[in-house]
Image (cartoon, rainbow, N blue to C red):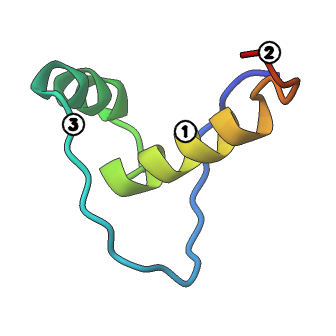
Amino acid sequence: MSFQLKANKKETENKTIRFPLPLIERIEKALENQDVTFSSFVLQACEYALENMDSSKKES
């Protein structure tokens, strides 16, 4: 399943997060001509990552 951008508005809370400048530039370039905000992209990317994480525990 590929990552697809979608418009979505939900109840939210503000959080402060720092991004490396090169990552911000890559995200902004990917969002050019898309009807998606930076925040919406980050939320969707996080949801995608959580849904697709390997949930098997690694031994320490």
Name the residue tied to disc 1.
45
Q: Amino acid at mark 2?
A: Glu
Figure check: 6 above or below 56: below
Residue lying at the far left of the rendered structure: 21
Q: Identify the residue at horizontal 24%, vertical 62% (top origin).
A: 16
* Foreground label between 1 and 2: 2
Task: Indicate left or right for 33 with 5 as reference.
Answer: left
Q: Amino acid at mark 3?
A: Phe
**Residue 49 occupies quadrant:** top right
* Foreground label between 2 and 3: 2
Residue toward you, 5 or 21: 21
Name the residue tied to disc 2.
59
Residue 53: percent from left, percent from top: 75, 28
Q: Identify the residue at horizontal 73%, vertical 22% (top origin).
A: 2
**Residue 54 occupies quadrant:** top right
Task: Specify which label sits upstream in the sequence, 1 or 3.
Answer: 3
Task: Specify which label sits upstream in the sequence, 2 or 3.
Answer: 3
Q: Quadrant of the C terminus?
A: top right
Name the residue tied to disc 3.
19
Residue lying at the far front of the rendered structure: 60
